[in-house]
Amino acid sequence: MAATDGLSRLICQMGKMCVSKQLLGSKYCSSTVSILPNRPSSSGFTPKQRNWIKRVGVDKHGVKTFNPQIVYGTVGEGMAMTMNTEELDRMMPTADTMRELFNGTPYEELPVVFVKATKNNTIINTVHVRNFKSTVIINTSARKEGFKNAKKKTTIAGQATGMATAQKLLRRGIDTVRVVIAGLGPGRMSSVSGIASSGVTVVSISDRTFLPEYGPRPRKVRRI
């Protein structure tokens, strides 16, 4: 009998309706009448009744929380934008790129110009890779090209270092290279432009700048 009374009380509380008038704007505007369900309070419900409320999808405020007709996580799937990437795919390297010829030389046999751009200097090494063995051909830096002290970390020094590297390559009969950049110094791109503007063909530019995921250990907390 007590269970029946509790269930009937639950149905009555959930079935109550209240009429609320909402005035829009000034007193001359017409009022709208909306019928809203009364929000049942969670007090007085047994755990079994609360589970029943959650199962049908109504929370303690009388708001519907679950709709079995909607599959959550799929909203917006059909609105994805389609983009033609054929032109971009042709620009990306493939397995055949390593055997592609550039001025009569396969890509994998081209000399590699390593540019290390630090905050105080620009160092350029040209390496020849043959039979899985690398041989340093040319080594130069902004200091070797005559820039001293604070002048080493300027973009002009980086460009001059790149031009000097290109002239040394041309004297050795090398006119096609690939460039690998490491570092975020001022001579990062000016050195590459110096190489390209001196008559050396740059086939590819790769970035191998090391980016630490966590970084060094922070300093300890200062004691006052």
Image (cartoon, rainbow, N blue to C red):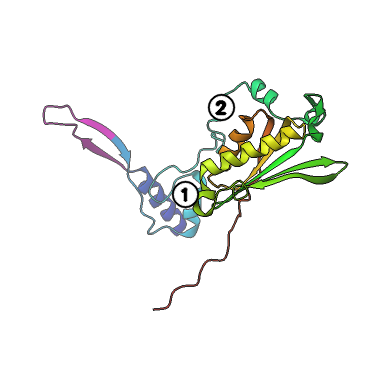
Q: Quadrant of the N terminus?
A: bottom left
Task: Identify whether 3 is placed above or below 188.
Answer: below
Residue in the image at 38% along x and 59% along y:
44
Disc 2/disc 1 C-alpha distance (Å):
37 Å
Helix, strand or loop at label 1? It is helix
Q: Amino acid at mark 2?
A: Ala
Residue in the image at 78% along x and 29% along y:
97
Q: Residue furthest right?
A: 131
Q: Verify whether residue 25 appears in magenta.
A: yes
Q: Residue furthest bottom?
A: 224
Residue in the image at 59% along x and 22% along y:
83
* Residue nearest the observer in this picture, 60 or 96: 96
* Residue nearest the observer in this picture, 115 or 64: 115
Q: Amino acid at mark 1?
A: Ile
* Residue nearest the observer in this picture, 70 or 221: 221
Tell me if I can see residue 61 in this picture.
yes
Disc with the residue nearer the chain's start (2 vs 1): 1
Residue 51's x, y, as percent? 50, 53
183 left or right of 21 in image: right
* Magenta region, residue range: 17-34
Task: Identify whether 29 is placed above or below 154.
Answer: above
Residue 53: give its label.
Answer: 1
Q: Verify whether residue 172 appears in magenta.
A: no
* Residue picked out by circle 2: 80
